[in-house]
Amino acid sequence: MNSALQLPLLPPPTHGPAEMRRSVRGRGSISLAREDEVTIARTPDDYAGHVREMIATWGEFELTVDDFLVEGARAYVRLTQVGRHLAPVDGLAPTGHAVWQINSIVYHVADGPIAEYWMQIDRAGLRAQLCAAT
């Protein structure tokens, strides 16, 4: 029995994320394996550097909050990030094409600021777009 998660294969971006989500029905599927978790500790300066790297890789990307839920000291955010592939990603040369990805983040807030967070990124969907563009 194959217990791999089956997700729709997304077409390369030619229009906005909402239209792309609606266009998924009826397409083929791919099998995905879970990536190993990675923990990254960042200071505010480290985080600022990370944002600069993101801008170098994706340009002046756009973030759209699709869902925002709060319960106690935890907040859940599902967002869509849209940008352009301007720098190498996972060994793939820049294409200049528009790409989008969906992220889910749980924030833990303690005494005002964010104390920690956990993020899941649709890296398989991103990689499918990058491979289709090359």
Image: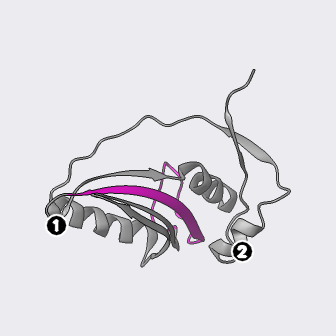
- To which quarter of the image does residue 113 belong? bottom left
Is residue 65 in view from this perspective?
Answer: yes
SS at mark 1 in the image: loop
Left or right for 90, reference 129? left
Q: Amino acid at mark 2?
A: Glu
- Residue beneath disc 1: 112
| Quadrant of the drawing holding the C terminus | bottom right
Is 90 placed above or below 21 here? Answer: above
Residue contact at pointers 2 and 1, CB within 8 angstroms: no
Eye-nearest disc, 2 or 1: 1
Q: Is residue 86 visible?
A: no
Residue 98, position as x, y percentages in the image: 59, 72
The residue carrying mark 2 is 19
Give the answer, above or below, for where 103 lies relative to 13.
above
**Residue 127 placement (x, y as % from top left):** 59, 52
Tell me where the magenta segment starts and ends, as one range: 85-109
* The residue positioned farthest toward the right in the image shown: 26
Percent of width and height locating residue 83: 50, 73
